[in-house]
């Protein structure tokens, strides 16, 4: 009986020693792992080109900066018929300068107009980014060749797609990488803003007014504000609740002369 108790105690001791050893080994592995250098994915040639085109807010010709400018100015880069709101030129998407008249649509194809303006402005940035990339990589011993691409811009839900078609980019150093076309995807709510704004303008044309609450019911992720100005202008501010991205435009419709009650 005594031998059995000693045997059991011996087994228990072995298990305890093994458990301590396992814990020590696992702890040692974690300590070594923490001391390992962090792996950083190197920038690829294609990511360098895309990064240059997307750019940042401080680069006036970058896609990111152009996107913000268009959103702040009613869907255009160069406002012509605009209302000055908080020192910002906001394009009229629907306008009349007459009293008691419903407004006239200024941009019937808002989405297409935005795509056209973006294409016209981003082409120069694309060419400079490609040239900068070629000079940089040739300095590293690469042979770079490409054709001036056919650029297209498309607004789709949540994204601006800039396509460099027939680019025929070749990057050679020991081996050759080839890219016939190149697409740059940039997250943006411009598509959603264009669709909702066009719907609001349709209401302004038909009824001379619109109800912001209706659009917030139909588009729960969108906040729609309508700020009335002294001259009869309405400034619309659309805010995406998920990203806090904003789009602003102006409308002037069914304006009542000063001093006359609307009741």
Image (cartoon, grey):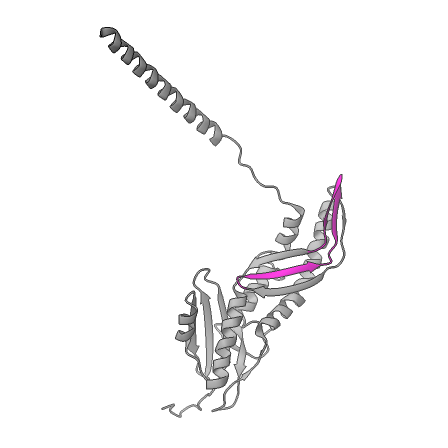
Q: Residue at x 50, y 76 (%)?
A: 199
> 156 above or below 214?
above
Q: Which residue is most to the bottom? A: 260
* Left-right relation of 110 to 238: right
Q: Quadrant of the C terminus?
A: bottom left
Q: Residue at x 75, y 54 (%)?
A: 168
> 110 above or below 205?
above
Magenta span includes 159: yes
Q: Quadrant of the N terminus?
A: top left
> 162 above or below 193?
above
Q: Quadrant of residue 3?
A: top left
How would you classify the magenta stretch by its main secondary structure?
Answer: strand
State whether residue 112 appears in this view. Answer: yes
* Left-right relation of 46 to 209: right
Q: Residue at x 65, y 66 (%)?
A: 119
Residue 145, position in %: x, y? 77, 51
Residue 83, position in %: x, y? 52, 78
Q: Magenta region: which residues? A: 157-181
Number of callouts: 0
The residue closer to the viewer here, 95 or 84, is: 95
Q: Quadrant of residue 143?
A: top right
State whether residue 77 appears in this view. Answer: no
> 65 above or below 218?
above
Magenta span includes 101: no
The residue closer to the viewer here, 10 or 188, is: 10
Residue 155, position in %: x, y? 58, 65
Residue 167, position in %: x, y? 73, 56
The residue closer to the viewer here, 83 or 34, is: 34
């Amino acid at each position: 009986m005594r031998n059995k108790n000693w045997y059991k105690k011996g087994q228990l001791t072995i298990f305890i020693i093994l458990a301590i050893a396992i814990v020590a080994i696992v702890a040692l592995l974690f300590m070594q792992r923490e001391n390992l250098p962090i792996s950083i994915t190197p920038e690829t040639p294609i990511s360098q080109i895309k990064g240059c085109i997307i750019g940042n807010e401080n680069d006036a010709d970058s896609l990111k900066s152009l996107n913000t400018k268009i959103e702040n100015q009613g869907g255009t880069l160069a406002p012509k018929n605009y209302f000055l709101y908080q020192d910002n030129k906001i394009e009229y998407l629907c306008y009349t300068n007459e009293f008691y008249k419903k407004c006239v649509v200024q941009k019937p194809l808002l989405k297409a107009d935005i795509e056209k303006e973006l294409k016209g402005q981003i082409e120069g940035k694309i060419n400079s980014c490609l040239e900068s990339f070629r000079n940089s990589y040739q300095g590293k011993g690469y042979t770079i060749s490409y054709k001036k691409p056919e650029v297209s811009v498309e607004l789709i839900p949540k994204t601006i797609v800039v396509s460099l078609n027939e680019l025929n980019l070749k990057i050679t150093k020991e081996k050759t990488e080839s890219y016939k076309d190149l697409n740059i995807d940039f997250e943006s709510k411009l598509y959603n803003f264009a669709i909702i704004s066009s719907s609001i303008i349709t209401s302004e044309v038909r009824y001379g007014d619109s109800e912001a609450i209706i659009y917030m019911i139909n588009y729960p992720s969108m906040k729609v504000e309508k700020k009335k100005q002294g001259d009869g202008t309405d400034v619309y501010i659309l805010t995406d609740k998920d990203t806090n991205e904003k789009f602003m435009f102006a409308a002037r419709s069914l304006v009542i002369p000063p001093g006359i009650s609307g009741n």
